[in-house]
Image: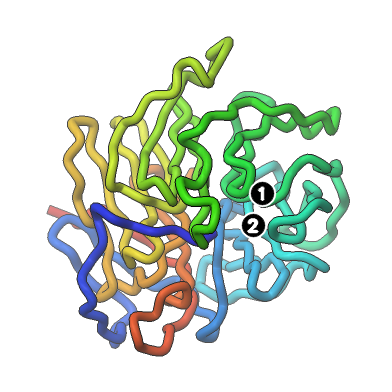
Amino acid sequence: MSALVVGVCLGDDRMEVAAMTALLPNFDTAVVAEWPPGTFVENLAPGGRGRWLVTLPSHRRVDVVQPDGAHRPLVELPHPATGIAPVPGGALVLTGPLGEAGWRLLRVGTEAGVREVCELPDLRFGNGMAWAGNELLVADSALGAVFAVDPESGRARVWLHHELLARQDPRSPFPGVNGVSAHAGQVHLTSTDRGLLLRCPVDAANPAAEVEVVATGVCGDDLAATDDGALWIATHTGDSVVRRLPGGELEEVAGVRQGAAGATAVAVDPEAPEVLYATTNGGMTRSRGRAPGPGRLLRISPRAR
């Protein structure tokens, strides 16, 4: 959810996106779908056949987006929907009252239908979520912990608890651990309030003993990893999507002019792995004195050379 970017924030310059497509030197960014201002488009998962499922905690629902950008509500819920992870025919979705007990994991079908997978009584602020083998790693931004959830059995356990995952200031409005990505044997995490990018081996016997600080001053929201070793990070209040190369260099992929104000999450397109999709909230978390824009689903692809 909320994220603060220190090292990769853009300035206060903010422009309306007049065209549906905009360019940065290395990437093309296209607006696939839009929602009215005030819509917090939080997270996304591929839904097959070019469709995407997105969570809208501001409206307590999950929407499905068609390849042509048409979108509709798929399910409405009593509490905000946050994290989402793909499964055949739909997605698993976290939902619950922010900061309180009462969280659940649901299975939502791409066409229709929703059913409860399990209750998550120990969760307080479920956020980023990623598959690691047959388990889901779930970030709890309030507790500063990562849970491992087995959807088949419904069992959940604390997989990682570490001081760097907690808010530095308990009164901060920004989350502790936020985004989760499990790829190529490594789990990468954003710790938003501390401005940290962390990692540890996915198969660690004691993950807390192997937590490593990868970067400081890069306070992201959600993130994704690709086979070339790059990390793609949604910076949320930094109003951008950035790429961190294996050598540590940061490159802006999309900014305000490309429609990435309030970028909340990123995901690789499984049907075209060179393409990235991102969600935004239009900058509603920190509008910098201006009215927020629409929430968006963006498609980011390498620019033809």
Crowd tier of the residue under label 2, counting other residues whose Cα lies within 10 Å: few below 14, some 14–19, many 20 or above = many
Quarter of the image for residue 171 reads bottom right
Q: Is residue 202 above or below residue 16?
A: above
Q: Quadrant of the N terminus?
A: bottom right
Disc 2 vs disc 1: Cβ atoms closer than 8 Å? yes
Relative to 114, is 19 on the left or the right?
left
Q: Which mark is residue 36?
A: none
- Residue type marked 1: Gly
Crowd tier of the residue under label 1, counting other residues whose Cα lies within 10 Å: few below 14, some 14–19, many 20 or above = many
Residue 233 in the image, given as x and y percentages of width and height: 36, 49
Q: Regarding mark 2 in the picture, which secondary structure is present there?
A: strand
Residue 141 in the image, given as x and y percentages of width and height: 58, 48
User: Can you name the residue that lies furthest to the top here?
Assistant: 205
Chain-order first, disc 2 or disc 1: 2
The structure residue drawn at horizontal position 26% and vertical position 81%, both measured from the top left corner, is 14
- Residue type marked 2: Thr
* Front-lying residue, 143 or 81: 143
Numbered circles on residues, count: 2
The structure residue drawn at horizontal position 43% and vertical position 57%, both measured from the top left corner, is 277
* Front-lying residue, 292 or 151: 292
Residue underneath mark 2: 82
Q: Is residue 79 above or below residue 266?
A: below
Type of colouring: rainbow
Relative to 186, is 97 on the left or the right?
right
Residue underneath mark 1: 126
The structure residue drawn at horizontal position 31% and vertical position 31%, both measured from the top left corner, is 214
Q: Regarding mark 1 in the picture, which secondary structure is present there?
A: strand
Relative to 154, is 51 on the left or the right?
left
* Front-lying residue, 96 or 130: 96
